[in-house]
C-alpha cells in the first residue's frame, strides 16, 4: 500500500443520523427545494461525485428512511499529513509489540546468545 499517495475523502453534507431535526419535508416540491439547498453545499468541481443514499426500514412497526448526501474530493494537505502521521504512529506501535514478542519468544526458547 502506497501510504504517501493522496487519497479521496468522502464528505458528508447531510446525514439523517446527525441532522434528525432538519429532515426532509413530506411535500414533493418542498423536498426538491430541500435537496437543492443541500446541493448548494457541494462545491461545483465535486458535484459529479455527489451521492444520495436512501435506506428504508421499520422500527417498532413504524417506517423510516435514513438519508445521507455525500461527495468525494481529494484529501487536503492537512488531512494527508494527519493520515500519514497516524499510519506511522500505528506502524511504530505494531513494530514495538512485535519486537517485544520476538524477545519474549527468544527467552522462552533460549535462543538468545
Image (spheres, helix red, strand yellow):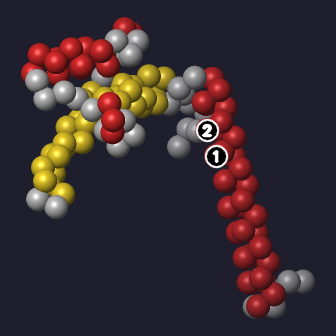
**Horizontal arrangement in the rendering, residue 65 relative to residue 27 (left or right):** right
Give the residue drawn at x 46%, y 30%.
9
> What residue did someone put label 1 on?
87
Kindly identify which numbered label has been placed on residue 83: 2
- Residue 51 position, x and y percent, is 27, 27
Q: Are marks 2 and 1 in contact (CB under 8 Å)?
A: yes
Dividing the picture into quadrants, the one containing residue 19 is: top left
Q: Quadrant of the C terminus?
A: bottom right
Q: Is residue 75 left or right of residue 86?
A: left
- Classed neighbour count for the residue bearing mark 2: other residues with Cα under 10 Å, few (<14), some (14–19), many (≥20): some
Tell me: residue 107, above or below residue 99: below
Which of 95 and 77 lies nearest the eye of the viewer? Answer: 77
Residue 53: mark: none
- Above or below 93: residue 33: above
In this view, 92 is above or below 34: below
Residue 46 seen in render:
no
Secondary structure beneath dot 1 equals helix
Residue that protrudes farthest toward the right in the picture:
113
Q: Secondary structure at mark 2?
A: helix
Q: Is residue 103 visible?
A: yes
Location of residue 3 in the rendering, given as x and y in whole percent from the top left corner: 58, 39
Instruction: Answer left or right for 4 relative to 35.
Output: right
**Circle 1 residues within 10 Å: few <14, some 14–19, many ≥20:** few
Q: Nearer the viewer, residue 28 or 48?
A: 28
At x 74%, y 84%, the residue is 105
Amino acid at each position: 500500500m502506497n501510504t504517501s499517495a493522496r487519497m479521496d475523502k468522502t464528505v458528508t453534507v447531510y446525514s439523517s443520523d446527525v441532522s434528525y431535526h432538519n429532515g426532509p419535508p413530506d411535500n414533493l416540491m418542498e423536498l426538491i427545494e430541500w435537496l437543492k439547498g443541500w446541493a448548494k453545499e457541494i462545491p461545483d468541481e465535486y458535484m459529479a461525485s455527489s451521492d444520495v443514499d436512501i435506506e428504508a426500514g421499520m422500527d417498532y412497526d413504524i417506517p423510516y428512511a435514513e438519508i445521507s448526501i455525500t461527495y468525494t474530493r481529494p484529501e487536503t494537505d492537512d488531512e494527508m499529513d494527519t493520515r500519514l502521521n497516524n499510519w506511522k504512529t500505528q506502524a511504530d506501535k505494531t513494530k514495538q509489540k512485535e519486537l517485544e514478542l520476538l524477545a519474549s519468544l527468544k527467552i522462552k526458547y533460549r535462543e538468545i546468545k
